[in-house]
Image: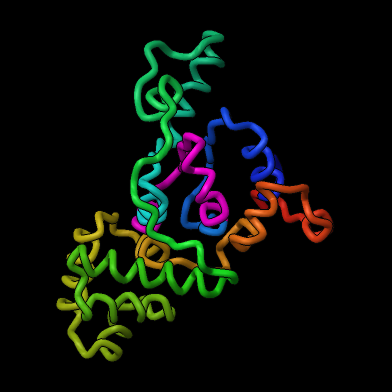
Amino acid sequence: ADTLPCLLQSLTETPEAVLILCLRPREHIYLFYALKNLFLDHPVLVISDELLFSDRLVLHCWGDISCASYGEIQSVISGLQKSGHCPYPLKGKLAKFLSAPECVTGFFEVPMIFNNPKRLMRYMSLLMHRATTSCGVTSSQQKLLWALYKGHYSLSGLTNILNKNEKQIWQDKNRLLVKLGMKNRLYELLYGTRFCPDMQRTAFISPADAKKLCGAETSAEYENTRDPLWG
C-alpha cells in the first residue's frame, strides 16, 4: 500500500496480514494514530535505522511495539547477495517476529479523541514531558532543552540565558544524556526529546475517517487528496 487510506483498507480486508514498518517512529505519529485499532488484530514490528528517546516513547505509547535494528535487515540482504539464502539461524527481533508474529500486548496511551493534528501533537508533547520527568529530568534541564530548541547552541550564549556558568551547563547536559540514554550529539537532544509537527511524513486522518476507511469504500475526498504514505 502506498497511501495510508489504502493501507487501512488492505489490513481490514486481510485479517491474517502482519505489519513490518520500516521507519523512524517519531516521524510517523499520525500513522500510528490511524492504525491503533488495527494493531489489536495485526502483529506489528518496526525496523528503524536509529532509535532515539522520542522513537522509543512512540513505540511504548502504542502498545510497546517491538523494534528491530536496520542492521538485522542488512545481514539478511548480505546473506542473500553472497549465498542466495538467508543466514541460518536467523537471530534477533526480526527472526523472532517472523517465526512467531504476535500482536502488541502493552497499554495504548493515546486516546482516540483528537480530530485534528495540533491537538494530537500537543498531547504527545505532554506525554514527552511526563516521560522525561519520570526519568529524572529536572526543570533546569528542561530549560536547557528549550534554549537548544530556539537555536542557542554555544556554551557562552547559554550562560546568559540560563544564568549558569559553562561548567554547570556542561554537567546539566551530560546528566540529561545519561538519564535519557542518549549519545552526546546535539541531534539527539533536538529530536530525541520532542515531537515536531513539521517532521511528520504521514497525512493525518481523524479517528472517524479511519473508521470509515476500515469499514467502507474509500470516500471521494480521499480519492482526490491521496498523499504518499512515505513522502
| Depth check, front residue: 114 or 64 | 114
Q: Which x, y percent locates residue 22?
A: 53, 40
Q: Residue at x 51, y 36 (%)?
A: 42
Q: Quadrant of residue 9?
A: top right
Q: Outermost residue toward the front?
A: 215
In this rendering, is residue 134 above or below 27? below
**Along the horizontal axis of the image, is 98 left or right of 148?**
right
- x and y, in percent, of residue 86 in the image: 48, 14
Residue depicted at 56% across the width and 59% down the height: 30
Q: Vertical placement of 75 versus 141: above or below?
A: above
Q: Is residue 52 visible?
A: no
Which color mode does the image show? Answer: rainbow
Report x, y in % for residue 71: 43, 32
Report which quarter residue 117 is drawn in.
bottom right
Picture quadrant of residue 170: bottom left
Q: Which residues are magenta?
A: 31-56
Relative to the observer, which residue lies in front, 182 or 121? 121
| Residue drawn where x is 30% and y is 83% of the image | 158
Relative vertical location of residue 121 with respect to residue 106 in this rendering, above or below: below
Residue 206 lies in the magenta stretch:
no
Q: Nearer the viewer, residue 141 or 162?
A: 141
Instruction: Give whichever of 88, 223 is nearer the camera.
Output: 223
Would residue 134 appear left or right of 6 to someone viewing this image? left
Give the quadrant of the N terminus: top right
Residue 52 falls within the magenta-colored stretch: yes
Identify the residue at horizontal 56%, vertical 16% (top origin).
Answer: 81
Question: Is residue 98 at all visible to an observer of this figure?
Answer: yes
How many marks overall? 0
Q: Residue 53: where, in percent of width, then height?
A: 34, 56
